[in-house]
Image (cartoon, grey):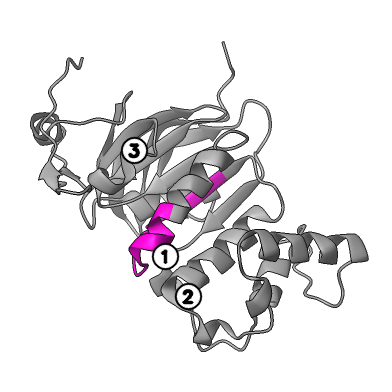
């Protein structure tokens, strides 16, 4: 049996003295693709901060059985300052290694790595464009390339489908499907219908965490989990997903 990449053991945390997450436990394995869903204010982003090491714990432990994994992180578009004077190429190059150095201070090999990543993502013609001039999809691609440029073991995406068009959304789905062949992915979303075709399993976060070993949840199960997320399938004819199945 594979060893977990990381283990959250009875985590309790929050801000100041106010707990947001209570008694949260989860094992994340290599090549998992977990969709993290839940209502606004339920603790999804807090969970991500815990995994990234950005938030101290009130109690509980985080274990890395094989050492701390190299992690790439795509924040929400709303958290990105578009007025900051930085180009597409500079954003992506800042993700190379741990030095935080920008071009032209990277080695020729690392510069070539950045160039190749931009070309593969369709950003080659935008390399010198300031991020303030990018569309939502182009901005997401830029910061996703930054998250991927150092070849992480774990990729964390916080609401990557917001403020983007359907074309980019479909492109993102295909991209993540290929990436999951070589890395573990955690994808935070409020829309289970959009992410269910991509993810393998689902974690519902609403102060506590309920893990579901499938990518299909019925409305009834979500109610049991106290996770008020609408279950919608997006296709030629949008419809509610009410597929029932056994769950312990």
Residue 1 vertical position relative to residue 43 in the rendered view, above or below: above
Which of the pair 175/147 is nearer the observer? Answer: 175
Task: Please give left or right for residue 214 compared with residue 86 in the image.
Answer: left
Q: Describe the element under mark 3 as helix, strand or loop.
A: loop
Which dot, 3 or 1, sits closer to the camera? 3
Residue under the point 14% across and 49% down:
238
- The answer to whether residue 51 of the structure is visible from this angle is no
Residue under the point 29% across and 27% down:
212
Residue under the point 55% across and 81% down:
131
Graded by Cα atoms within 10 Å as few (under 14), some (14 to 19) or many (20 or more), the crowding at tag 1 reads: some
Q: Describe the element under mark 1 as helix, strand or loop.
A: loop
Residue 166 covered by magenta stretch: yes
How many badges with numbers are in the image? 3
- Which numbered disc, 3 or 1, marks the residue that appears first in the sequence? 1
Task: Please give left or right for residue 95 compared with residue 172 in the image.
Answer: right
* Alpha carbons under labels 3 and 1: distance apart: 21 Å
Circle 1 residue: 76
* Alpha carbons under labels 2 and 1: distance apart: 7 Å
Magenta range is 155-170
Q: Label 1 near label 3: C-beta < 8 Å?
A: no
Give the quarter of the image for residue 58. Answer: top left
Residue 219 in the image, given as x and y percentages of width and height: 10, 35
Residue 85 in the image, given as x and y percentages of width and height: 61, 89
Task: Please give left or right for residue 48 compared with residue 142 in the image.
Answer: left
Give the quarter of the image for residue 18. Answer: bottom left
Circle 2 residue: 80
Q: Describe the element under mark 2 as helix, strand or loop.
A: loop
Circle 3 residue: 197
Which of the pair 109/150 is nearer the observer? Answer: 109
Which of the pair 144/177 is nearer the observer? Answer: 177
Specify the farthest residue to the front: 236
């Amino acid at each position: 049996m594979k060893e977990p990449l990381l283990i959250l053991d009875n985590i309790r945390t929050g801000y100041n003295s106010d707990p947001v997450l209570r008694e949260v436990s989860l094992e994340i394995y290599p090549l998992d693709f977990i969709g993290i869903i839940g209502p606004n204010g339920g603790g999804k982003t807090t969970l991500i901060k815990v995994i990234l090491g950005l938030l101290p714990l009130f109690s509980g432990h985080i274990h890395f059985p094989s050492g701390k994994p190299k992690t790439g992180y795509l924040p929400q578009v709303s958290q990105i300052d578009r007025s900051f004077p930085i180009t597409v190429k500079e954003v992506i190059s800042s993700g190379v290694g741990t030095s935080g150095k920008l071009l032209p201070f990277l080695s020729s090999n690392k510069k070539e790595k950045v160039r190749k990543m931009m070309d593969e993502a369709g950003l080659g013609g935008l390399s010198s464009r300031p991020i303030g001039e990018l569309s939502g999809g182009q901005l997401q691609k830029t910061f996703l390339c930054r998250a991927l440029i150092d070849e992480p073991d774990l990729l964390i995406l916080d609401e990557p489908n917001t403020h983007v068009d359907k074309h980019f959304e479909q492109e993102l789905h295909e991209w993540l499907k290929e990436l999951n062949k070589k890395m573990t992915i955690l994808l935070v979303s409020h829309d289970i219908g959009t992410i269910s075709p991509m993810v393998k399993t689902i974690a519902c976060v609403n102060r506590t965490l309920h893990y579901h070993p499938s990518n299909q949840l019925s409305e009834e199960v979500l109610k049991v989990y106290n996770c008020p997320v609408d279950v919608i399938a997006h296709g030629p004819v949008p419809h509610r997903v009410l597929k029932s199945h056994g769950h312990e």
